């Protein structure tokens, strides 16, 4: 409540797009703390802001606001982020961004902007911010952080869009690609049993990365399901016999334009056509003698790729929790969430909540009666936890791997990159929790989030 009062006195509260648009009409500099509902505005900068407001308050050039990213469409790029973001708006244009509670940088930026505004007001300087705006928005769209400051400094010296574009191309080589929509794409590739027996390494160094792979023996039922559009074709019995004759290697391949590129490499559909029309194609090169069916598959369209990838690598949800000890500091919390993101998980739901003793006991019901049970429940209820639903293929298992072994001493030895190796205090307060099975995950998700439709 106290914090809320301070905010009302001191920082304008922006909760929707209309309020955001109204804020843009403010003259002078507005420093906006962009926050997400689950974590609330940043308290760590309040004293700094108050001091700066005192220092620069007299000509009404400096203003502060807090804006909730979740409810303002313009701030969409900042949702699901795990660190505070401060935007700097001058005369209705966002011209700079600082990510993280970097007090010296925030202070420097505010001082510079206020001084610049004063010089402009006194006729000592011309306004050059249109170019900064252009670059800043490019940065926001790219969600880039690191070089924002250097670019914004450099752009003071630029005087044309060409200069700015050159700088952008230098710092962000992918910028143009992202504009033309050429981002990484995934396709599904199958290497069928007869070829797999002979040769496993046919994925050449052709710019593909293997995002996921598994070797499985498909059942007749799975093959009928996967190839349901082919079951009435005369070649289907041979295909079925082939596909059930041993393990198949299933790959999710990524690169730009992966679908078309993989299909180009494969060549014509049948072995006969491939040998005749494109003898260098993979299907021609890796044809297996006396087997009319080609040994390689690739998805045909983006829709097919999505369905096929989903078939072999279904998305799974797990419940992950940053325990109170690790959720105590912004840094601990954000560093762990950064690792979650870097590992490719989607955070489908997130909230900060203190578990009740009943919830903690339910989570750990298998440990009831163990000597550490009481202490465990105490540790889990000593403050707010960050509770997340994580979504990824094989999420339950992969989150457990990312957490690492229960005891951080073991984790440091065997999985030094794991979260517990890096963030756990001891075996009891070991930073994170994760469901142990899919079934457990569903129960825990329901216990914390109620009956929800995650997708
Ligand atoms: N010997 C122990 N001494 C103290 N605490 C323990 C001990 N063993 C387990 N714990 C605590 O109980 C929790 C649950 O234990 P479990 O064996 O299920 O570990 P886990 O599956 O690696 O962790 P979690 O279930 O929290 O994801 C551990 O995370 C840890 O906090």
Image (cartoon, rainbow, N blue to C red):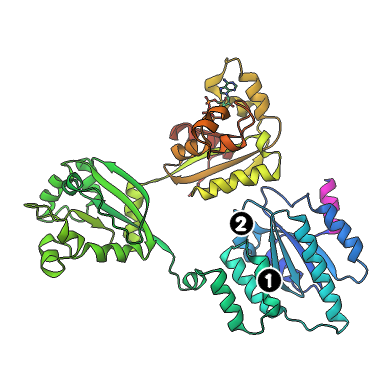
Badge 2 is on which residue? 79
Q: Magenta stretch: dominant SS?
A: helix
Q: Are marks 2 and 1 in contact (CB under 8 Å)?
A: no
Residue at disc 1, CB closer than 8 Å to ligand 1: no
Q: Does 34 lie within the magenta span?
A: no
Q: Nearer the viewer, residue 83 or 287?
A: 287
Q: Nearer the viewer, residue 455 or 203?
A: 203
Q: For residue 152, which numbered disc appears in the image?
A: 1
| Magenta region | 2-10
Q: Is residue 407 visible?
A: no
Q: Give the percent coordinates (x, y) of residue 267.
A: 20, 65
Q: Using a 10 Å C-alpha cutoff, classify the residue at mark 1 as few (fewer than 14 neighbours), some (14 to 19) or many (20 or more).
A: many
* Secondary structure at numbered mark 1: helix
> Does residue 10 lie above or below 89 as drawn?
above
- The residue at 72%/50% (across/down) is 40
Q: Give the percent coordinates (x, y) of residue 272.
A: 10, 63
Q: Farthest residue toward the right?
A: 58
**Image quadrant in which you'd find residue 362:** top right
Residue at disc 2, CB closer than 8 Å to ligand 1: no
Q: Is residue 453 visible?
A: yes
**Image quadrant in which you'd find residue 363:** top right
Q: Does 6 lie within the magenta span?
A: yes
């Amino acid at each position: 409540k106290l914090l809320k009062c301070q905010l009302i006195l001191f920082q304008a509260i922006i909760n929707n797009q209309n309020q955001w648009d109204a804020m843009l009409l403010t003259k002078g500099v507005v420093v906006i703390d962009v926050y997400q509902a689950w974590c609330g505005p940043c308290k760590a900068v309040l004293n700094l802001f108050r001091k700066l407001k005192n220092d620069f308050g007299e000509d009404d050039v400096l203003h502060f606001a807090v804006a909730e990213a979740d409810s303002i469409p313009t701030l969409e790029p900042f949702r699901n982020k795990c660190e505070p973001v401060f935007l700097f708006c001058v005369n209705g244009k966002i011209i700079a961004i600082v990510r993280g509670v970097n007090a010296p940088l925030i202070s420097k930026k505010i001082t510079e902007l206020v001084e610049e505004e004063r010089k402009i007001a006194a006729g000592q300087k011309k306004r050059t911010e249109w170019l900064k705006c252009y670059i800043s928005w490019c940065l926001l769209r790219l969600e880039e952080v690191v070089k924002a400051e250097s670019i914004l400094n450099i752009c003071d010296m630029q005087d044309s869009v060409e200069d700015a574009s050159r700088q952008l191309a230098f710092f962000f080589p992918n910028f143009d690609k992202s504009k033309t929509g050429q981002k990484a794409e995934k396709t599904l590739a199958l290497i069928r049993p007869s070829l797999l027996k002979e040769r496993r390494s046919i994925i050449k160094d052709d710019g593909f990365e293997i995002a996921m792979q598994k070797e499985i023996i498909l059942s007749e039922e799975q093959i009928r399901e996967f190839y349901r559009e082919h079951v009435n074709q005369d070649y289907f019995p041979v295909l079925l016999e082939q596909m059930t004759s041993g393990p198949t290697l299933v790959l999710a391949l990524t690169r730009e334009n992966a679908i078309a590129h993989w299909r180009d490499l494969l060549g014509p559909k049948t072995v006969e056509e491939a040998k005749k029309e494109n003898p260098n194609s993979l299907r021609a090169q890796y044809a297996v003698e006396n087997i009319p069916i080609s040994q390689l598959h690739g998805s045909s369209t983006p829709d097919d790729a999505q369905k096929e990838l989903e078939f072999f690598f279904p998305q799974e949800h797990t419940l992950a929790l940053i325990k109170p000890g690790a959720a105590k500091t912004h840094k601990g919390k954000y560093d762990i969430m950064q690792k979650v993101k870097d590992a490719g998980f989607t955070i489908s739901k997130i909230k900060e909540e203190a578990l009740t003793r009943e919830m903690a006991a339910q989570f750990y019901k298998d440990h009831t009666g163990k000597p550490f049970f009481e202490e465990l429940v105490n540790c889990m209820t000593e403050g707010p936890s960050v509770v997340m639903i994580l979504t990824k293929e094989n999420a339950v298992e992969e989150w457990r791997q990312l957490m690492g072994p229960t005891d951080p001493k073991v984790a440091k030895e065997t999985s030094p990159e794991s979260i517990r190796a890096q963030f756990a205090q001891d075996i009891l307060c070991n930073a994170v929790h994760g469901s142990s099975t899919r079934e457990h995950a569903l129960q825990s998700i329901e216990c914390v989030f109620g009956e929800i439709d995650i997708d």
